[in-house]
Image (tube, rainbow, N blue to C red):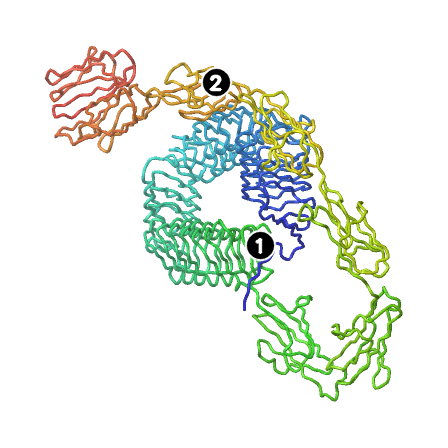
């Protein structure tokens, strides 16, 4: 039968497994299963391997002891870790302590190297000391440490310096770390600084403004996620590395006049960057997606730039052959790529928020770069030329509405069928549109390869069948969230992240797959079982975070030669992995023992005799073997040893005879369960002789071993080792020495029962035999014990010695010897009495001697307990003190037995508390009201002292007495400001808001705290609380709709109770204003006494036969037409209103009739004015003009 056996994580290595559950290999700690909360690394460890404690949630304290190197990710994500002591550590690997969110202190006096992101997000760390031994400080080593304000560096440090919580290199040319806990809103780099180090400002939330007067380089992710950063001055910067300002969402001012290299994602997700963006004259490199996620509507660049040019706001190479970047917020739903363009650079259109159609059929495009049109949420149609030869990875990924991709022209290099793009001969599937609604897909027979990201994000698919596909590209089915089944009959290679994030994937059939590369099935939460019989290479993280994956069967994958780190790292629970060979099991890292159990599929193999009459032995890899589990292909070497007078008859395996093999050796290669047996056959009886061995058993305690032995056959003496014929009888005669006797006879190692005589007759059996005689001296038994007078254990021990040798109770003692008994009382006990054969002895010491021992005796000893006096008192009164042994109260001065447990309880009077305990006049650090003597060992005195409980005041107020009131309560009773209460009292402060106000902030002793309308504080000192209220703000939004617009400020922020500014609904030509969607008919409209957010849309209707367009009135002189505005053809006008830019009506009136209308201007200020005219059909006309 087949069996599986669990292997230790360090197979095939020299390792040491401690009882505590850790594994050490050549001084390297490689695994520690279920470590305690506080750990001290064993003294023999000099290095902690990568990932050993990663994601552990229980460890609170670490002392690395003699360790000199901590590997990468060693304590990554240990969220419970609070304190780290590293007295000898010199090297800390990258991310070694990342996200240890509770680490408050780190001691590393000998550190020399700190790796990248080593202490990232250690949120409780306020200060860190960098010793003079430090030589290398990795990028982002202290990034996102929420409370870090102090980085201490000695003045004489040879490599680093620290100023105001900012770490620099010694010459102050490079900024290495900026404390995230610093509260300053502005920062100006010293004039010596030329470089901002990677991740040095990452996640700093206090900064709103930064000046970098002499900086020339900002390294990768230098200011990433500085979410409140508004402006950056960097006049000398020439290089912005990748993600330099990524996710600085409020960054609205970022001039880069001297930048030559703008690398990928430099301003990604900087959503406050809007409008036109000027690129520098000297720009030579523009990285992919540098501006994705911004509000940039157009690029601008000088014509003197030698590398780039801008046409219609779009960035091209100077020769217009390469389209480099399309502004992500550029207006317009259609874009036609120029005919000169041969290449759409990777990420060129990535993140376009408006495009629906891209026309490129008339262009010269041959190459479409990776992610060229990715993440365009509205994109529906793309037309490409037939000369296109290359489509990069993920060129159309994350375009959920893209349904129409077409190629125009003769002899195209790609085939499009049903919206799917193939190469010309349909051997490679390149793009499967995300917008396709089909639930299943079967690839054509011709397809042998799936391109990278070809199906990525296709959420409609639930089943795919790839009958002849050999290779799946990287990310080919990633994020297909509804994919359940994948039929991969001929697939041999599954590249990295191919099914990453397929959270419903349950069934995968891939009988021929040889390579499953990194993260191929990462986060496939429903995947439960794996069985890839042809697998040779399993990449790192291939099945990580597969939450339901419990078993991995690789027993048929005998060719498996590589397994990457955390290849089958489960999301939860213990994963069971079964492999074909022990050598394959060794690929799994030692730290995996906490995540999975590795088993090797084994086969039952046994080697035995088929009958008897001989022996059989076997070895496997040079070691003895009888029976047990072996893996496939192991070799068993078997040797048969026939007994005297016997020969090999046959060999059988599982009952089948090996024909023609009667040799004494056999070599067997394991291919399954095997019961190997050998059978012997007897030689003719007349040929059989057997060896007879005889002698006296050696006994060094007896002279001459105690006697002699003579052996005769047919009256003749025979020597030991003589061959004697089967069935003959041999006479054995023993002759004891003086003072000795026959103890027993032995035949072939077994005692002959009931025979202590001096003679024995031996009949030669069918086989070799050995006969021996043993002699002895007479001895007497001794019994001894402890009388259990006061406890089941007897309160002490008793030993016996003869000639300084220990004798156990029941042993026999040689005649005339002296026995010395020694009693050892337990602590607190003493010898009470000795008894010999029940008679009390006069000796009361700790020893007793029995001389000339000549008959059996029984010796006993009895112990009794010691007692001590116990005194206790209250020093100075103000409370009481009670002492108990068990439930019995005792008085001061009482005597108690040794080992007694005494509990003392202090009860302070009202208004008092415990000050201290004194035990035998020595202060005790016990702060509780109960003290305990755990095992009384001497006279003891206990004193307790009490002291008054201090009182503290609570003072509270409302800033400027505006916006609400503040009340305080202690134990549900109102507390006046300035009142005092006992230390530890809980104070509840409650804010009562005036309508229209919110809480702005609470201050406790001048420091801001987080709370809304209630705040609880504990009195441990005098506390002063203040609260500040602020008026609520609301957003007013006015929308014009499809048939008109809104003039004025369409989005307004207004405080509670105040009024917004005027807006006017202006209809499109041929339409008239009816009302606002909330049934308000005022136009212009002013919303007063605002108390909530508002979103309204103007409602228009078709005008009744009157065309009333909005006209751009020419600029006029205020005195035109004698201080009036002259309007001709005014017969249809009913009334008019003249308003300023704030919506205030300056002049209004009714037209008296006639073909002309003079409107008095009465303009006292310069600026824009609106003249609104109501026509007889109810529709309006609006004129605007500028008063100079």
**In the structure shown, which secondary structural element does the residue marked by tag 2 occupy?**
strand
Query: Could you say which is closer to the camera, residue 899 or residue 1092?
Result: 899
| Number of the front mark, 1 or 2 | 2
Q: Where residue 881 sits in the image (x, y, percent)?
A: 60, 27
Query: Could you say which is closer to the camera, residue 836 or residue 555?
Result: 836
Q: Is residue 575 above or below residue 172?
A: below
- For marks 1 and 2, give the CA distance: 62 Å
**In the structure shown, which secondary structural element does the residue marked by tag 1 occupy?**
loop
Q: Where residue 311 sits in the image (x, y, percent)?
A: 38, 36
Q: Where residue 809 sits in the image (x, y, percent)?
A: 75, 57
Quarter of the N terminus within the rendering:
bottom right
Q: Is residue 924 above or below residue 515?
A: above
Disc 1 or 2, which lies upstream in sequence?
1
Quarter of the C terminus within the rendering:
top left
Query: Could you say which is closer to the camera, residue 795 or residue 220?
Result: 795
Instruction: Residue under label 2, please give it.
Output: 954
Q: Quadrant of residue 356?
A: top left
Name the side, left or right, on which 335 lies relative to 224.
Answer: left
**Residue at horizontal 54%, vertical 43%?**
55
Q: Quadrant of residue 176?
A: top right
Name the side, left or right, on which 534 lies relative to 169.
Answer: left
Q: Is residue 1129 above or below residue 1160?
A: below
Query: Could you say which is closer to the camera, residue 417 or residue 481?
Result: 481
Residue furthest to the front in view is 839
Label tally: 2
Name the side, left or right, on which 653 lies relative to 937.
Answer: left
Q: Where residue 178 sits in the image (x, y, percent)?
A: 55, 29
Q: Quadrant of residue 1117?
A: top left
Name the side, left or right, on which 402 lies relative to 976.
Answer: left
* Category of crowding for the residue at label 1, using alpha-carbon neighbours closer than 10 angstroms: few (below 14), some (14–19), many (at least 20): many
* Category of crowding for the residue at label 2, using alpha-carbon neighbours closer than 10 angstroms: few (below 14), some (14–19), many (at least 20): many
Instruction: Residue under label 1, please give it.
Output: 588
């Amino acid at each position: 039968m087949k069996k599986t056996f669990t292997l230790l994580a360090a197979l095939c290595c020299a390792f040491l497994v401690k009882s505590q559950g850790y594994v050490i290999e050549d001084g390297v700690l490689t695994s520690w299963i279920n470590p305690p909360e506080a750990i001290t690394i064993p003294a023999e460890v000099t290095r902690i391997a990568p990932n050993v404690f990663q994601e552990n949630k229980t460890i609170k304290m670490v002392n690395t002891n003699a360790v000199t190197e901590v590997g990468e990710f060693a304590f990554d994500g240990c969220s419970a870790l609070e304190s780290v002591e590293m007295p000898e550590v010199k090297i800390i690997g990258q991310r070694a302590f990342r996200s240890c969110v509770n680490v408050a202190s780190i001691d590393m006096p000998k550190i020399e190297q700190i790796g990248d992101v080593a202490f990232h997000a250690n949120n409780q760390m306020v200060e860190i000391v960098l010793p003079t031994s430090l030589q290398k400080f990795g990028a982002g080593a202290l990034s996102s440490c929420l409370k870090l304000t102090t980085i201490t560096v000695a003045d004489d440090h040879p490599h680093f310096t620290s100023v105001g919580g900012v770490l620099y290199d010694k010459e102050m040319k490079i900024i290495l770390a900026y404390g995230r806990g610093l509260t300053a809103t502005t920062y100006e780099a010293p004039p010596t600084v030329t470089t901002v180090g990677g991740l040095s400002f990452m996640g700093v939330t206090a900064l709103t403004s930064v000046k970098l007067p002499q900086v020339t380089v900002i390294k990768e992710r230098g200011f990433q996620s500085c979410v409140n950063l508004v402006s950056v001055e960097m006049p000398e910067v020439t290089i912005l590395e990748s993600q330099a300002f990524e996710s600085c969402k409020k960054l609205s001012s970022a001039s880069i006049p001297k930048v030559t290299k703008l690398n990928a994602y430099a301003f990604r997700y900087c959503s406050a960057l809007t409008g036109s963006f000027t690129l520098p004259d000297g720009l030579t490199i523009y990285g992919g997606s540098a501006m994705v996620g911004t509000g940039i509507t157009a690029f601008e660049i000088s014509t003197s730039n030698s590398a780039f040019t801008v046409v219609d706001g779009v960035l091209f190479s100077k020769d217009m052959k390469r389209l480099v970047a399309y502004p992500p917020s550029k207006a317009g739903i259609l874009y036609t790529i120029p005919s000169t363009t041969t290449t759409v650079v990777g990420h060129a259109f990535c993140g376009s928020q408006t495009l629906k159609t891209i026309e490129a059929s008339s262009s010269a495009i041959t190459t479409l770069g990776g992610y060229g049109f990715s993440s365009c949420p509205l994109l529906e149609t793309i037309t490409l030329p037939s000369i296109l030869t290359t489509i990069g990875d993920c060129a159309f990924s994350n375009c959920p509405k893209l349904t129409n991709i077409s190629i125009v022209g003769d002899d195209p290099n790609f085939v499009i069928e049903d919206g799917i793009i193939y190469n010309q001969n349909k051997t490679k599937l390149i793009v499967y549109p995300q917008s396709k609604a089909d639930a299943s897909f079967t690839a054509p027979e011709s397809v042998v390869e799936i391109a990278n990201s070809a199906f990525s994000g296709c959420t409609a698919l639930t089943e795919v069948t790839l009958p002849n596909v050999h290779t799946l590209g990287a990310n080919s089915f990633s994020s297909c969230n509804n994919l359940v089944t994948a039929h991969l009959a001929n697939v041999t290679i599954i590249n990295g992240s191919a099914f990453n994030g397929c959270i419903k994937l349950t069934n995968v059939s891939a009988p021929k797959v040889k390579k499953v590369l990194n993260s191929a099935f990462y986060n496939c939460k429903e995947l439960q079982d794996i069985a890839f019989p042809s697998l040779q290479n399993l990449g790192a993280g291939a099945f990580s975070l597969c939450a339901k994956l419990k078993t991995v069967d690789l027993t048929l994958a005998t060719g498996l030669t590589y397994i990457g780190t955390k290849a089958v790292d489960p999301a939860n629970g213990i994963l069971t992995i079964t492999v074909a060979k022990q050598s394959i099991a060794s690929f799994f890292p030692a730290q995996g023992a906490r995540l999975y159990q590795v088993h090797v599929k084994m086969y039952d193999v046994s080697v035995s005799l088929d009958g008897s009459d001989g022996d059989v032995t076997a070895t496997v890899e040079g070691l003895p073997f009888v029976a047990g589990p072996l893996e496939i292909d192991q070799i068993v070497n078997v040797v048969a040893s026939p007994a005297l007078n016997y020969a090999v008859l046959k060999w059988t395996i599982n009952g089948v005879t090996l024909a023609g093999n009667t040799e004494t050796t056999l070599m067997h290669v394991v291919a399954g369960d095997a019961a190997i047996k050998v059978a012997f056959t007897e030689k003719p009886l007349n040929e059989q002789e057997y060896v007879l061995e005889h002698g006296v058993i050696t006994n060094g305690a007896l002279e001459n071993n105690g006697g002699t032995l003579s052996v005769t056959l047919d009256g003749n003496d025979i020597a030991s080792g003589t061959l004697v014929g089967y069935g003959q009888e041999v006479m054995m005669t023993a002759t004891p020495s003086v003072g000795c006797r026959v103890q027993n006879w032995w035949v072939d190692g077994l005692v002959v029962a009931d025979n202590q005589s001096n003679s024995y007759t031996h009949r030669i059996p069918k086989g070799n035999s050995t006969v021996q005689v043993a002699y002895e001296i007479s001895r007497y038994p001794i019994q001894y014990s402890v009388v259990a007078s006061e406890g089941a254990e007897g309160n002490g021990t008793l030993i016996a010695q003869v000639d300084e040798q220990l004798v156990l109770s029941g042993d026999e003692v040689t005649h005339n010897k002296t026995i010395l008994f020694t009693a050892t009382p337990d602590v607190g006990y003493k010898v009470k009495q000795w008894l010999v054969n029940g008679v009390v002895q006069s000796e009361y010491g700790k020893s007793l001697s029995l001389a000339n021992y000549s008959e059996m005796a029984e010796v006993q000893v009895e112990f009794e307990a010691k007692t001590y006096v116990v005194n206790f008192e209250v020093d100075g009164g103000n409370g009481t003190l009670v002492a108990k042994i068990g439930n019995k109260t005792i008085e001061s001065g009482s005597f108690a037995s040794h080992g007694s447990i005494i509990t003392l309880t202090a009860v302070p009077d009202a208004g008092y508390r415990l000050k201290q305990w004194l035990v035998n006049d020595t202060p005790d650090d016990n702060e509780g009201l109960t003290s305990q003597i755990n095992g009384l060992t001497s006279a003891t005195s206990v004193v307790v002292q009490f002291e008054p409980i201090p009182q503290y005041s609570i003072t509270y107020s409302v800033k400027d007495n505006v916006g609400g009131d503040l009340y305080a309560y202690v134990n549900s009773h109102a507390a006046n400001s300035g009142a005092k209460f006992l230390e530890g009292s809980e104070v509840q402060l409650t804010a009562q808001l005036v309508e229209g106000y919110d809480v702005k902030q609470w201050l406790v002793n001048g420091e801001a705290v987080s709370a809304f309308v209630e705040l609880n504080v504990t009195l441990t000192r005098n506390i002063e609380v203040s609260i500040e209220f602020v008026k609520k703000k609301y957003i007013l939004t006015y929308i014009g709709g499809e048939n008109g617009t809104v003039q004025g400020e369409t989005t307004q922020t207004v405080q509670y109770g105040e009024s917004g500014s005027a807006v006017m609904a202006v209809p499109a030509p041929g339409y008239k204003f009816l009302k606002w969607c909330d049934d308000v008919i005022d136009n212009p409209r002013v919303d007063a006494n605002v108390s909530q957010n508002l979103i309204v849309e103007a409602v228009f209707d078709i005008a009744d036969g009157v065309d009333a367009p909005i006209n751009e009135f020419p600029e006029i002189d205020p005195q035109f037409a004698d201080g009036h505005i002259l309007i001709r053809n005014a017969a249809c006008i009913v009334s008019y209103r003249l308003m300023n830019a704030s919506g205030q009506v300056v002049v209004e009136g009714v037209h008296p009739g006639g073909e002309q209308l003079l409107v008095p201007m009465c303009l006292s200020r310069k600026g824009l004015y609106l003249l609104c005219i109501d026509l007889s059909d109810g529709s309006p006309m609006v004129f605007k003009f500028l008063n100079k």
